Amino acid sequence: MKIPIYQVDAFTGDLFGGNPAAVCPLKEWLPEGLMQKIGRENNLSETAFFVPREDYFELRWFTPTIEVDLCGHATLATAHVLFRHLGYEIDVINFHSKSGKLSVRNGTDNLILNFPADRIEKVDEMLSLNDALGVSPFETYKGNSDFMCVFENQDTIERLKPDFMKLSQIGCRGVIVTARGTNCDFVSRFFAPYAGINEDPVTGSAHTTLTPYWALKLEKNQLQAQQVSARKGYLNCTYLGERVEIGGKAVTYLVGEIEV
């Protein structure tokens, strides 16, 4: 069986930047175990699979080790494939996923994700988390899937060298670290060794947690964000209350075919 595959760099306008994702269009769902094997073989932070329905697409995402409930950059990559390669002509693509209804709008300069906003709660200091990060944040929050640790400045975020083995034992999908940005509203990094990804280059889903926090902290709903990984990513975020919009660019790296 042959399956089309696209590899797309998301949240960047430059090839070899942002976060690479694989996208596999399907006519009907493959067995879950096979999709997990393809995700492992691709060895990218996410492989997205989608199946067309009457007026929407069902969408699932696999890391090399697990299926996740929400992925931003692979959703952006999927929309890019539909708009740029598969001739989708309507300006808004609707997806159904384990996180409910999602959409992507074809904007003038960016593709714009519309995702549910995360709900976060402040938690007491976690010594095990601090030990894994090697630095103590001044605030820690828990969202639906991840912990978010807030630090005083961008320099601290860029210098972090976590112990990934210890982080993998924290018991959540991932850990977001964030601070006010030097040349943008806020910066972040995202560590997810539990999901088989020590550091994710650019994490759209993490911005469903980051955007509500920084919108309230900075008292503004339009925010410019950077994920300061080695590959770097650039995101335009809008806080809408129950939802957030996350805009970014995408670039195709590879178009091909896999045989299973």
Image (cartoon, grey):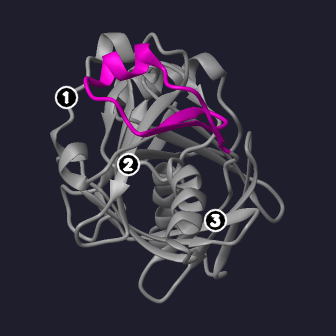
Give x and y (percent) for residue 62. Answer: 52, 31
Earlier along the polypeptide chain: callout 1 or callout 3? 1
Instruction: In this rendered view, identify the residue nearer to me: 182 or 75.
Output: 182
Instruction: In this rendered view, identify the residue nearer to me: 74 or 132.
Output: 132
In the image, 152: left or right of 74?
Answer: left
- Residue type indicated by callout 3: Val
Q: Which mark is residue 161?
A: 1
Q: Which residue is mark 3?
A: 244
- Residue 54 to residue 218: above or below: above
- Residue type indicated by callout 1: Lys
Magenta stretch holds residue 84: no
Magenta stretch holds residue 135: yes
> Which residue is found at the position 70% from the left and 47% from the top?
119
Q: Which residue is mark 2?
A: 178
Q: Which mark is residue 226?
A: none
> Which residue is found at the position 42% from the left and 13% from the top?
128
Q: Which residues are magenta?
A: 120-148
Mark 3 to mark 2: distance in Å? 18 Å
Number of marks drawn = 3
